[in-house]
Amino acid sequence: MATYKKRGAKKSVAPNTDTAVEIQSTTAEVFETLDTTASKTEEWVVKYQNVIFSLIGVIALGVLGFLGYEKFVVEPKNQEAVSELNQAQYYFELAVNSVNSDSLYLRALNGGEGKYGFLDIISNYSGTPAAKLATYSAGMSYLNLRDYKNAIYYLDQFNSEDILLSALSRGAIGDAFAQLGQLEDAYTYYLEASGVNENAYSTPKYLYKAAVTGASIGKTTSAIAHLKRIKNEFPNSDEAEKVDVQLGRLEQLQK
């Protein structure tokens, strides 16, 4: 049976007196330095404590002020703007689904029954989500009223993270330019609208408008490319059903 053999006890090592003294001296110097630094720091804090407390107070007030502004100013303003928007949007939706809609679009723009219209909301609640939506709806109202310059103005002001509304607003600007006879501008906005967010609704819709408009201003090759893209990439879209007729006509023109 194997047994473990102890090699022998370690020899005791006597501490070197000079080294111990040196270590104690160095340690003392370190603590003395720390004490001196701490004293200087305390003196600095005492000397500038009013400035420090003032700075802390300003920061605290700034944070509390921001939180208070958000809670007691921004939130109530947003809620009030939404309340006003509801009535204007109601008139807008009635106008969209009505035959004689001009008076309803005007009421949506200018307000009625003691409520603000889109224009009032844009003016009084600037920067709120409700004002952004009112800007879009105002532009669309003017478009339907055939006031194309105002339609372009408000739709161009519209800026949103909603990619579908962004695409629709750019396309509506294209429609307004087309009605004004500015077909180059219309073509540009239709292409922009088709590329805001590629999807099965807005992309083929505005590619088709770009193709038709482009063909009318001599951009036949581009128009054919747009139509072929609809046919290949969006075969189930409404626009795809009309592509072959347009392609046949344009390809015949190129011969």
Image (spheres, rainbow, N blue to C red):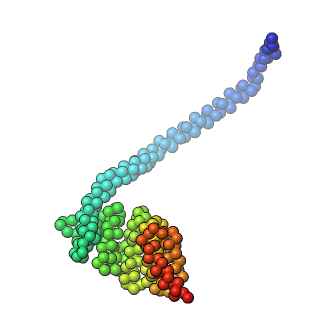
Residue 95 spot, x, y in % from top left: 25, 71
Residue 237, above or below 62: below
* Residue at x 18% of width, y 66% of height: 114
Residue 189, above or below 67: below
Whether residue 132 sits left or right of residue 11 in the image: it is: left
Q: How many marks?
A: 0
Q: Quadrant of residue 126?
A: bottom left
Is residue 212 visible in the rendered structure shown here? yes
* Residue at x 64% of width, y 34% of height: 30
Residue situated furthest left in the rendering: 113
Whether residue 217 sits left or right of residue 24 in the image: it is: left
Q: Nearer the viewer, residue 191 or 42?
A: 191
Residue situated furthest top in the rendering: 1
Residue 77, above or below 94: above
Q: Nearer the viewer, residue 25 or 243?
A: 243
Q: Quadrant of residue 53?
A: top left
Is residue 196 visible in the rendered structure shown here? no
Q: Nearer the viewer, residue 76 or 214?
A: 214
Residue 116 spot, x, y in % from top left: 24, 67
* Residue at x 25% of width, y 65% of height: 90
Residue 134 spot, x, y in % from top left: 31, 67
Q: Quadrant of residue 14?
A: top right
Q: Pick the quarter of the image with the C terminus.
A: bottom right
